[in-house]
Image (cartoon, grey):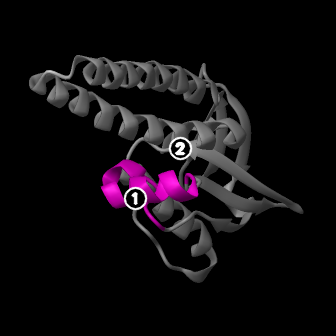
Amino acid sequence: MKVKLVDPDIYYPARRSMVFSFWVFNAAFPIGIGTSMSGFSSIVMLFLGLGLAFAIYAFLNFRRRRSAHSGLFLEMNREGLRICDDTGAVVEFIPASEIYEPYVPEKDQMPHNSIKAEWKELMHGARPNFVSFKHGEQKRELHFEPDSSYMMRQLEKVVNRWENRGQNKSVRV
């Protein structure tokens, strides 16, 4: 499993703003089109202008969200955890035997899976996607951008495998 590591201070506010601009654009544009059928040209121009402004805002916000990518990738498997750069060179490797107290949020962290999840993200902020663990005395938390719900399930399986490694339990990955 390979995911992009992100800066949480930039990524989560940008993701929340993305949801907001998506909803405003999707509300303003149809209202502008609908009122154009009834002949209110000033209202049409207002809503179309509002929709266009939020489309531009969404584009700029998308660029901000992309800039949150640190240039590093997180690879997790049975053997351990690797942090790689854009070229694929390993920057850091931590064997699974040295990872203690691994944790990943168990809820699905993909907000676009339902309208209810998007609404919660809009009202309460983005739920973080991260894996935390202890390595030696140091507690680490690595935030990432998941590509799919399937990837999140695979991440949970890897973390479960790490948790159960001393108990003769196995989890298929």
How many callouts does the rendering have?
Answer: 2
Q: Earlier in the sequence, mark 1 or mark 2?
A: 2
- Who's the residue at 60% across and 19% down the image? 87
| x, y percent for residue 29 | 27, 28
Residue 154 seen in the figure: no
From the viewer's side, name the closer residue of 103 and 20.
20
Circles 1, 2 touching at the beta carbon (< 8 Å):
no
- Who's the residue at 37% across and 18% down the image? 49
Looking at the image, residue 57 sits to the left or right of residue 50; the answer is right
| x, y percent for residue 128 | 59, 54
Q: Which amino acid does label 1 sit on?
A: Ala
SS class, disc 2: helix
Q: Is the magenta stretch mostly helix, strand or loop?
A: helix
Q: Residue furthest left?
A: 37
SS class, disc 1: helix
User: Which residue range is magenta in the image?
Assistant: 107-126
Question: Magenta stretch containing residue 131, yes or no?
Answer: no
Q: Quadrant of residue 36?
A: top left
- Who's the residue at 47% across and 73% down the image? 170
Q: Any mark on residue 16, and which? A: 2
Say above or below: 49 vs 126.
above
Say above or below: 13 vs 43.
below
From the viewer's side, name the closer residue of 76 and 64.
64
Say above or below: 111 vs 15.
below
Q: How many other residues sit within 10 Å of disc 1, few (<14), some (14-19) or many (≥20)?
A: some
- Where does label 1 land, which residue? 117
Q: What residue type is labelled 2?
A: Arg
From the viewer's side, name the closer residue of 47 and 5.
47
Question: Magenta stretch containing residue 109, yes or no?
Answer: yes
Q: How many other residues sit within 10 Å of disc 2, few (<14), some (14-19) or many (≥20)?
A: many
